[in-house]
Image (cartoon, grey):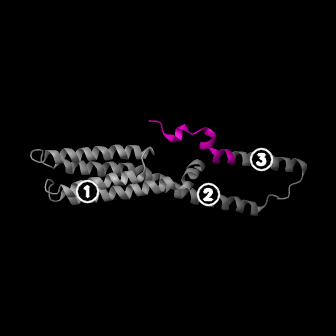
């Protein structure tokens, strides 16, 4: 599968980088021209160093926030996979004999959930559809309470709640516009 990000033209993907580079080049040329012509109206003094330090300080705040999201986003897919595997382990605890159809249906639902989750990561499925898929798993487990071991339904509910929390966090990180700019600056 090709990521939508890869399909975008270079100029669109890196517009911020190109704008910053162009602005820096223009400022550099203007500064050099002013120096050569003797028109410098901002002499180098200790105040200038303070302004540069303040800019770096503000940039570090931006990057520290982005870095925290970046580090967290590395862990979140693993948490989703772990929760999905825990629900699959509970599905294995359903006896195959008289409740074989329930067990099979639960595995089908988990397989569909895994596929939806995979497509959601590539932005080919909407978050609402993923949340509905999670709800279907819970509804099926509650409806099949007779076939599931006593504590399995509550464990499935806990794992699905954990998956919802992680999906919501990933959606928030994805939607934050400064994250892309921060990564680019980093």
Q: In the rendered picture of this protein, how many numbered marks are placed on residues? A: 3
- Residue segment shown in magenta: 1-20
| Relative side of 173 to 28, left or right | left
* Residue 13: x %, y % from top left: 59, 43
Q: What is the quadrant of the N terminus in the image?
A: top left
Residue drawn at (86%, 55%) of the image: 40
| Callout 2 secondary element | helix
| Relative side of 128 to 161, left or right | right
Residue 176 is one of the magenta-drawn residues: no
* Residue 150: x %, y % from top left: 15, 59
Q: Which residue is mark 1?
A: 139
| Relative side of 145 to 108, left or right | left
Disc nearest the viewer among 3 and 2: 3
Q: Which is more N-terminal, label 2 or label 3? A: 3
| Relative side of 106 to 180, left or right | left
Residue 7 is one of the magenta-drawn residues: yes
| Callout 1 secondary element | helix
Q: Is residue 168 above or below residue 26?
A: below
Residue drawn at (70%, 58%) of the image: 52
Q: Which mark is residue 59?
A: 2
Q: Which residue is mark 3?
A: 26
Q: Is residue 184 above or below residue 64?
A: above
Q: Quadrant of residue 18?
A: top right
142 or 167, which is in the foreground? Answer: 142
| Callout 3 secondary element | helix
Residue drawn at (37%, 59%) of the image: 165
């Amino acid at each position: 599968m090709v990521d939508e990000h890869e399909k975008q033209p270079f100029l669109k993907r890196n517009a911020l980088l190109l704008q910053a580079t162009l602005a820096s080049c223009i400022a550099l040329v203007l500064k050099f021209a002013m120096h050569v012509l003797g028109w410098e109206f901002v002499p180098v003094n200790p105040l200038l160093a303070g302004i540069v330090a303040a800019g770096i300080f503000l940039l570090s705040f931006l990057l520290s926030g982005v870095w925290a999201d970046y580090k967290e986003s590395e862990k979140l897919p693993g948490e989703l996979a772990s929760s999905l595997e825990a629900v699959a382990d509970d599905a294995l605890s359903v006896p195959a004999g008289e409740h074989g159809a329930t067990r099979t249906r639960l595995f089908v639902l988990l397989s569909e959930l895994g596929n939806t989750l995979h497509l959601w990561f590539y932005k080919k499925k909407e978050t609402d559809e993923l949340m509905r898929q999670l709800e279907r798993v819970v509804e099926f487990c509650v409806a099949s309470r007779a076939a599931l071991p006593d504590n399995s339904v509550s464990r499935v509910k806990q794992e699905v709640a954990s998956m919802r929390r992680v999906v919501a966090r990933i959606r928030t990180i994805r939607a934050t516009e400064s994250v892309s700019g921060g990564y680019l600056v980093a």
